[in-house]
Image (cartoon, rainbow, N blue to C red):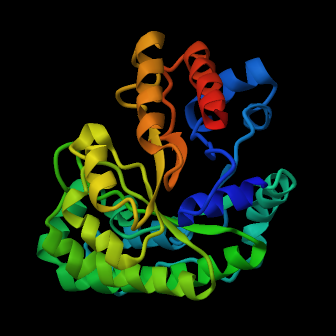
Amino acid sequence: MNSVQRVRNAIMGKPIDRQPIYGWVSENLSEEITAQFGSVAAFEDHYAFDVAHIFGGPWSFSGEKFDRIRSENEELTPDVLLEYDLFADVDDIAAYSNVAASLKHHKQRDRFCYMQTPGFFEHFNTVFGIQEHLMYLALYPEELKELYRRQAEWTLRFADHCMELGVDMIHLSDDWGSQRDMLFSPKTWWELIYPNMKTVVDHVHKRGRPVSLHSDGCIAKVTDGIVQLGIDVLHPWQENANMPLSLYLEHYADRFALLGGICVQSALGILPQDELEQEIRRVFGLLKNKRWICCTSHFVQKHCTMEDLTFAYDLIYKLARE
């Protein structure tokens, strides 16, 4: 069983020969990893990562257009933004060359590749700023709904191009949660986020690919909605944000798979190694042989030492094969 088969089976709840493993390791520790292993790619090969997270392609907001819009408007509110064509050319095939190069590297290793794809709330934070965006959810709901709809149309084309290149799964990134609760009301989520994300998920499913979702924090109030969306994989299911694994195991383990389990906020780079080992063994005890891909809950943070990182992945590598 190669990595693609292993991960697909884990997502669908079918038999696997071992637990698939991955980690968001490069964002903050690429220099340290390269110093010890020669490159991040060598680290990924050393621990036989089954998954690759692909970034690249055109960004949906044209930088040139955005700069011009900002210069022409004292305040950039959703109603003002609707008057402009903000979006970049999604059909600029040359802009996907970095995606093709990443896929070539990882497919030579038979890895399951998922593609970073913009969501809605998180994505428009880059335009408005998160505080302003939260305010605009209350002040401009209809205008934001239309902006999200336009983003969904762009994302459909983006996903099509990525799937044509050979991406195995489309990954939507759209943070909705804080440490204790959602950033906005479930009512707002159902009215503004759900319909547009459902359009994207259904389209990808029609192309025969699964869809994963990243959302940090506590999103327990919309987990039933995540089921209705048809999300196949959720990252990370953040236990230290009011999301106990018991909730997943009792109510959702047969509805979608998890990507995660190794928390970068409360375990990796935080705990002494004896306690870190206990925590990793606890997670494996709960999730092994279930619909689970072992991964970090987010990017490994800068304060994590290479000693702790290699200690964790030596253990993960071992437990995945026991």
**Residue drawn 32% across the image and 87% down it:** 146
> Residue 169: percent from the left, percent from the top?
61, 68
Instruction: Give residue 176's quadrant in the image.
Output: bottom left
> Residue 41: percent from the left, percent from the top?
77, 38
Q: As displayed, is residue 83 above or below residue 290?
A: below
Depth check: give the residue in front, 311 or 34: 311
Q: Quadrant of the N terminus?
A: bottom right
Instruction: Give residue 222's quadrant in the image.
Output: bottom left
Q: As displayed, is residue 125 above or below residue 69?
A: above
> Residue 241: percent from the left, percent from the top?
25, 42
Tally of numbered tags: 0
Examine the rendering and report whether any part of residue 85 can be seen: no
Horizontal side, residue 227 vs residue 62: left or right? left
Examine the rendering and report whether any part of residue 159 can be seen: yes
**Residue drawn 34% across the image and 57% down it:** 175
**Residue drawn 55% across the image and 66% down it:** 12
Depth check: give the residue in front, 71 or 96: 96
Horizontal side, residue 40 vs residue 129: left or right? right
Horizontal side, residue 120 vs residue 88: left or right? left
Q: Quadrant of the C terminus?
A: top right
Seen from this angle, which residue lies furthest right?
Answer: 108
Q: As displayed, is residue 282 above or below residue 227?
A: above
**Residue drawn 43% across the image and 32% down it:** 264
> Residue 223: percent from the left, percent from the top?
27, 64
Q: As displayed, is residue 291 above or below residue 87?
A: above
